[in-house]
Every structure is written in structure tokens, then in C-alpha cells.
Image (cartoon, rainbow, N blue to C red):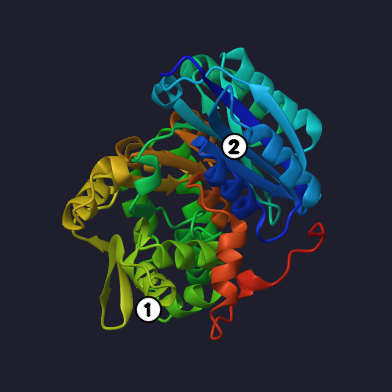
């Protein structure tokens, strides 16, 4: 590099309006200055534009920039910096923080955790302000394991969800999402609803409790619970379908993923009689679950074929990924129970959604807010992008679009 060439950081601030960037770039073009980098952010119509430029000692670039700023009501500051091309090669991470609210102490806890691992925050982007508040921090360098441990501690202390991921092509190129159904896509447990309609809710609940205590594995507990349904008219499934409650944000979540070209699948330890209908209603590409045997309009109390258990869910993820030609690194799995652990471990990103503690501890990250579409923020999707896409769809009628009470003003 020519010794007479200096690297200057030009910071321009002012009220945002069309033509500011064009005007400043025009000054640089007229004076023959070198442009190395630029970045712009607008907050509440206040613009900050940074330009990294190279000039020679005899150039009048700075004088011309100041005059241009004075003419157009802009404030300009200059700083001589040491230009280096090594910055782009430093490891970069993305820290996402999500909460019902994010007060200053919670954000200070998150940023302090990043600093504890020697991470340097390069950029901050607000992803959403409703139904939850979320921010994305782009972090340069740092010890990822130290940051991860500190972020987990900050998450527990302040009651917020925090995830750290390496910034890479794989993070931005996820193509397949596989979800659990009961207590994930829907708020209910189908076997419990079916047992209630069939009049054996207490007996089924007792078996479930034994399974949770480790006395039964999933397959044994499922077969024993289904046996209690023997003799129940198949019409009971219709009543269960009517009683199902989608998790808030479920339609928005699936709809947005489909718009972005994702393949979406559900896999359940429940029953195809329920999951097939959910898949049709939501436009889900793949649905895999257990099949209840029904003979002459009556549930026999048996399950046909192999049971979809913990290992089976992971196998389904792998099979769908292979069929869709998606590398496992580009898959996302979402679930809440121990039955989902293998699936979460197999995916490129495993997300525990309102999950049991053992699942939260094992997953790559956890979301504890009651909105399924909050997972979009972990994928770097902003709420305003979702809203803009929804607003442009004149046929969209959806409970997910009802304004959230208490939404803060823009």
C-alpha cells in the first residue's frame, strides 16, 4: 500500500431521507477516494452511516465531505484508523436473545456474558418487538464455550432465552424443519384427549406417570395406554380433532417457512388420524406418526406397525432429509420431551420448545416463550419481514394476525 494513503472512518449522522448515501458516495467518486467498507443503520428515522475510505495526504476529500454535509444538514466526524484485511477471517458468532420483555439489566447480562468470553459485539439488530422482544448480536472473536456458559447463566438469572450459533453459510441455509406435535405444534397431548373422550382418562394418566418415573419405556407405555381405548367408537377421533388447540404462532411459523422455501415436517408419537389432518390444514410437507388400528368403526386398542419412539423420530428426520436431499447440518428439529432428544441431537440445530429441563439442557438452544413463531428469530428472520409478507396476502385470514394486547408503539 502507498505510504501516503491513509484510512479514514467517516461517520455521518442526521435525519434519514432519500439521497444521503448517494450524495456522499458522489463526493468520494468525484475526488477519487477509495471506498473499503460501509455500513448504515436507521433508528427512529435517525441515520448513522459509516464509510471506511482511503485518501492520500494531499486530497481534499475531507473538506469536500464537510462542505457537502453542511449543505445537507448532516453531521460528519472523521477518525484515522488502521485498516486490516484480517478482520473478515476472525470467527464470528450470532447471539440471539428472546424475552417477553428485555429490560436493560437483562440485556446487560447478555452483553456482559459476551464480554466475559472476550467476544466483541460488531452489530446489533432488533428482530422483533411483539409478541416477544428479540435482538441479534453479531459477535467477533471470543471463546465460544466461555461465552456459552456465561450466556446460560445470564439466561437463567434474567429469565430470557439466549442462543449462540457460529455465523456461517450453514446457519443461513437451513432448509428442513421437523417438529414434534403434542405440546409443540399443538398445546395438547392427543392420547390424553382421546382417553378423556373414551372415559379412561385416569387410567391413562396413571400409565403416563409410570412412564415418567422410568417404570416403562415409551413403546410399552404407548401400547398399554392405547389398549385402554379398546372398544371406543372411531368417532371419538372427530371430537378430539375439534378440541385441538394450535400453539400460538403455529400458522405464522409454518406459513413463513413455506414462503422461504423450507420443507416442513411433523413427527409424532401420537396418531396419523390426527397428524394427517394437521398436515393438510397447515400445508405441512411430511407427517409421520403411529397408526391406530380401527376395525368396523371401532378402535381395537392396538397400534399397527412399528412404534414411533425416541430413536424412531431421529430416523424419520434422517429419512426425510435424505429424501429432500438436505444435509443434516441444514436441518432444524423442534421438540419438548425426552422422546425428542435423539431427533434434536441429530439435527443441525436442535431447539427445545417449552421443554422439560432434561431436554433444555441437552438441546442446542431453548425457547421458553409460548409462541412457536419465536423460533423464526433464531433463524435470523425479522418480525417486520413476516408482517410485510402477511400484509401483501389479501386472502390471508388467520388468528395469528390478531394484534397482541399491550403491543408497544412503533
Q: Nearer the viewer, mark 2 or mark 1?
A: 2
Q: Nearer the viewer, residue 83 or 72?
A: 72
At a point 71% along the width and 53% down the height, the residue shown is 129
Residue 250: x %, y % from top left: 53, 63
**Residue 112 tag number:** none
- Disc 2: CA contacts within 10 A as few (<14), some (14-19) or many (>=20): many
**Disc 2: which residue:** 51
Quarter that holds the C terminus: bottom right
Task: Give the residue at the far front of this rendering.
Answer: 58
Picture quadrant of residue 157? top right
Sooner in the amino-acid sequence: mark 2 or mark 1: 2
- Residue at the image point whose x is 62% and y is 44% from the top: 40
Residue 371, how many percent across, how many down? Answer: 60, 55
Q: Nearer the viewer, residue 339 or 157?
A: 157
Task: Out of 88 and 81, give the one closest to the viewer.
Answer: 81
**Could you tell me which quadrant the N terminus lies in?**
top left
- The crowding category of the residue bearing disc 1, from other C-alpha atoms within 10 Å (few below 14, some 14 to 19, many at least 20), is some
Please identify the quarter of the rendering in which residue 277 is found. bottom left
**Disc number placed over residue 234 in the picture, else none:** 1
Check disc 2 and report its element: helix, strand or loop. Answer: strand
Q: Residue at x 56, y 85 (%)?
A: 394
Residue 288 place in picture, x, y as percent: 29, 61
Between the residue at mark 2 and the residue at mark 1, the CA separation in whole angstroms equals: 68 Å
SS class, disc 1: loop
Residue 288's place in the image compared with 207, above or below, is below
Amino acid at each position: 500500500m502507498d505510504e501516503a494513503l491513509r484510512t479514514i472512518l467517516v461517520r455521518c449522522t442526521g435525519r434519514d431521507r432519500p439521497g444521503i448515501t448517494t450524495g456522499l458516495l458522489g463526493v468520494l467518486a468525484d475526488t477519487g477516494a477509495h471506498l473499503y467498507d460501509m455500513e448504515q443503520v436507521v433508528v427512529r428515522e435517525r441515520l448513522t452511516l459509516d464509510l471506511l475510505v482511503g485518501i492520500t495526504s494531499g486530497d481534499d476529500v475531507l473538506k469536500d465531505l464537510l462542505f457537502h454535509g453542511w449543505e445537507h444538514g448532516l453531521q460528519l466526524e472523521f477518525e484515522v484508523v488502521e485498516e486490516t484485511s484480517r478482520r473478515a477471517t476472525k470467527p464470528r458468532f450470532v447471539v440471539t436473545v428472546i424475552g417477553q420483555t428485555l429490560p436493560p439489566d437483562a440485556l446487560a447480562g447478555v452483553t456482559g456474558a459476551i464480554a466475559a468470553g472476550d467476544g466483541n459485539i460488531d452489530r446489533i439488530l432488533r428482530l422483533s418487538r411483539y409478541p416477544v422482544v428479540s435482538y441479534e448480536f453479531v459477535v467477533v472473536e471470543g471463546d465460544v464455550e466461555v461465552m456459552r456458559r456465561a450466556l446460560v447463566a445470564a439466561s437463567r438469572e434474567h429469565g430470557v432465552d439466549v442462543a449462540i450459533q457460529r455465523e456461517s453459510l450453514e446457519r443461513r441455509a437451513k432448509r428442513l424443519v421437523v417438529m414434534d406435535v403434542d405440546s409443540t405444534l399443538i398445546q395438547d397431548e392427543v392420547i390424553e384427549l382421546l382417553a378423556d373422550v373414551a372415559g379412561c382418562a385416569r387410567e391413562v394418566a396413571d400409565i403416563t406417570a409410570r412412564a415418567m418415573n422410568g417404570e416403562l419405556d415409551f413403546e410399552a407405555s404407548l401400547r398399554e395406554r392405547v389398549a385402554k381405548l379398546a372398544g371406543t367408537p372411531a368417532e371419538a377421533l372427530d371430537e378430539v380433532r375439534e378440541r385441538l388447540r394450535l400453539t400460538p404462532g403455529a400458522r405464522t411459523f409454518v406459513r413463513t417457512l413455506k414462503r422461504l422455501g423450507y420443507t416442513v415436517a411433523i413427527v409424532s408419537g401420537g396418531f396419523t388420524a390426527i397428524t394427517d389432518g394437521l398436515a393438510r390444514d397447515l400445508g405441512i410437507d411430511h407427517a409421520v406418526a403411529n397408526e391406530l388400528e380401527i376395525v368396523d368403526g371401532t378402535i381395537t386398542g392396538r397400534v399397527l406397525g412399528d412404534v414411533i419412539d425416541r430413536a424412531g423420530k431421529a430416523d424419520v428426520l434422517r429419512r426425510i432429509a435424505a429424501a429432500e436431499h438436505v444435509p443434516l447440518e441444514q436441518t432444524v428439529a423442534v421438540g419438548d420431551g425426552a422422546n425428542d432428544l435423539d431427533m434434536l441431537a441429530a439435527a443441525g440445530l436442535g431447539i427445545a420448545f417449552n421443554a422439560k429441563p432434561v431436554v433444555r439442557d441437552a438441546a442446542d438452544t431453548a425457547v421458553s416463550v409460548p409462541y412457536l413463531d419465536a423460533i423464526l428469530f433464531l433463524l435470523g428472520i425479522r418480525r417486520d419481514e413476516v408482517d410485510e409478507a402477511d400484509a401483501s396476502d389479501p386472502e390471508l385470514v388467520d388468528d395469528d394476525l390478531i394484534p397482541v394486547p399491550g403491543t408497544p408503539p412503533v
